Image: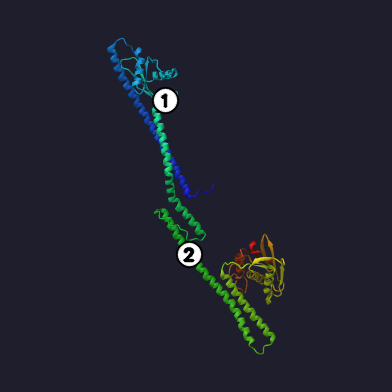
Amino acid sequence: MGRLRTRSKYLIVRLLIAAGLTAAVVLTLRMYFARNAEREMSVAIQRCAAQAQAFISLEDDLNRKETEASGPVSKGGQSAEKISKLFDCEFELMVGGKLLPSSLPRTAQGILERQASAASDGAVWTMNFGVEKYQVSTVPLAGRAERLVVLKSWAEVHDRQARLTRLMIVLAIVASIVGFPLVLRVSDTFGRPLNNLVGAVHALEKGDYEYPVATQSGDELEEVTLAFEHMRASLQESQKRVIQSERLATIGQMASSISHDLRHSLTAIIANAEFLLDDKLKAEPRVTLYQEIRAAVEQMNDIIESLLEFSRGRETPRLVAVNLGDVVDRAVRRVKARTEFQRIEFRVEGAETLECEIDPVKIERALVNLLLNASEAVTANSGKVGVQWEKRGGALRMEVSDNGPGVEEEVRSKLFHPFASYGKATGTGLGLAIVQKICEDHGGSAKLESTRPGLTVFSMTLPQKAC
């Protein structure tokens, strides 16, 4: 089971507390009603006993005046029946520890007889006749040998308790139904700001500094929210300073690298141009100087194009259907045209006709950058550079390999970072960064597949939609 959110936890706790309090109130009221019922029954049976004693005494006085012959035995049952009709209790008469004949069942009469015989006058106790419960007491009758047994039924009290219990349950249910929205409202008061704050933390993790977290609860939650907003503003300001510092450092690094490369090319152009001014210069040296000037200009053009490509950011490539073999051939020819790479062995392996939808200009540039890096990594006399391509898993995959010494461990993680030109005397350090950018523009990726002395492989993978 997944973790419950704060609002749900708080709501469950509130409902459990409300249910517990309701149950406690119901049980407390039932105990209170039970104690009151016992007191009520004791008072009621004592009142019935006093009224019965007074009535029987009055009746005896009247009977004594009418006839001296009337005995208690002949009148006893009649007296018990008469006062039972007059008062809200039942009465039985005992003579010598025996109950006079009554309407009670024989079994119940026997039980009552034993308990009444053992009880002292005025004692009150409870007994059950089947499913019915009675409060019982015995009282003496003045001037008579009989004892009066008073019985008061609990039926009316039980009915009243049952009605009260039902009423309390109904009220508890109604209170729960009415109180549930209030509990939701109260839980929202605490849950929503906390959930909002959690959402703001997740948004901050993703770099979103505009996630709304304002609250006006006027309590500790507002203090926490204000502290979070203050922290977020401080982080944003710190991030801006870091980004600004990184930009300045990048600009400085770029300016240093580009100025060195441009100065080197410009120096070569100026020097060779001055040599060309010599009227005595023969045709062959003049051609050589021209080629050097042209190479310097092309190098400057490459630098400018690299800067432009890097500064454009993410953009949609212009996809056209082309034969990938033609793009590879153009890239290889551009690299082999350089004087310093003419003795390197280039191996091209791939389908002669493989039509793909790519931006041919950008892919050619990416291949040229990988080929230049590979050519610079190998020795001029024994260097070997290979280019392979194929369809694999519905994607286009191109690999550029070389037999150089391999890439050092400490620089592998930063190969595709801009201005990373480890171990090179020249270059802007943008070559691999541009390769990665072009692949990402196509929805693919570039990476160092493997490297060891004698074999280093870089790959470019373009998704199926690009081929």
Q: Is residue 372 above or below residue 167?
A: below
Identify the amino acid type marked 1.
Answer: Lys
Residue located at (39% from left, 35% from top): 29
Q: Quadrant of residue 40?
A: top left
Q: Residue 133 carries which label?
A: 1
Query: Which color scheme is applied?
Result: rainbow
Residue 173 place in picture, x, y as percent = 43, 39
Judging by the rendered image, the residue that carries numbered circle 2 is 238
* Disc 1 crowd, CA 10 A, few/some/many (<14, 14-19, 20+): some
State whether residue 465 is above or below residue 169: below
- Report helix, strand or loop for mark 1: strand
Left or right for 268, reference 88 = right
Label 2: state its secondary structure.
helix
Expressed as whole percent of the image width and height from the top left, the position of residue 54 reads: 30, 20
Residue 220 in view in this figure: yes
Q: Which amino acid does label 2 sit on?
A: Ser
Looking at the image, is 67 positioned above or below residue 6? above
- For the point 66% across and 81% down, which residue is it? 291
Query: Residue 281's quadrant in the figure?
Result: bottom right
**Residue lying furthest top:** 69
Question: Residue 307 got which mark?
Answer: none
Does residue 452 appear anywhere in the picture? no
Instruction: Give how far across and how far down residue 309 sits, in percent.
Output: 59, 71
Confirm or deny contact between disc 2 and disc 1 (CB under 8 A): no
User: Where is residue 144 shown, x and y percent of the image?
Assistant: 32, 15
